[in-house]
Amino acid sequence: MSGADNQQERPGFEQWIVGFVDGEGCFSVPIFRQRTARLGWQCQPEFAVVQAAPSASVLHELQQYFGCGRVGVNRRHDNHR
């Protein structure tokens, strides 16, 4: 049985992405002055998901699904181990 009647149905990959990004991601749209832009302002939307290095494979799966983006290493130096 599938559909809304069966609440035990396993979610698909798209639903997993929604839940994962809700907890681990962020979407921001900063707007700032840019004199060389036609209207003098620039909008730079960004979608980011952050994971520790051992979970980088998840980021690569998201990159493959969306067909864009980059996976990089955050080389911050602080006391968060």
Image (cartoon, grey):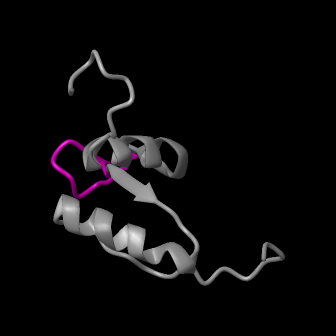
Is-magenta flag for residue 36? yes
Q: Position of residue 53 (x, y in %)?
A: 55, 80
The residue furthest right is 79
The residue furthest top is 5
Q: How many marks?
A: 0
Q: Position of residue 23 (x, y in %)?
A: 54, 45
Q: Position of residue 34 (x, y in %)?
A: 32, 54
- Give the prevailing secondary structure in the magenta stretch: loop
Viewport quadrant of the C terminus: bottom right
Foreground residue among 38 and 50: 50
Foreground residue among 19 and 10: 10
Is-magenta flag for residue 19? no
Viewport quadrant of the N terminus: top left
Q: Residue at x 39, y 30 (%)?
A: 8
Residue 27 lies, with reference to residue 36, above or below; the image says above
Give the residues drawn in magenta, as a range: 30-44
- The quadrant in which residue 78 appears is bottom right
The residue furthest front is 1
Q: Residue at x 21, y 27 (%)?
A: 2
Q: Residue at x 32, y 52 (%)?
A: 44
Q: Is residue 78 left or right of residue 20?
A: right
Q: Position of residue 29 (x, y in %)?
A: 38, 43
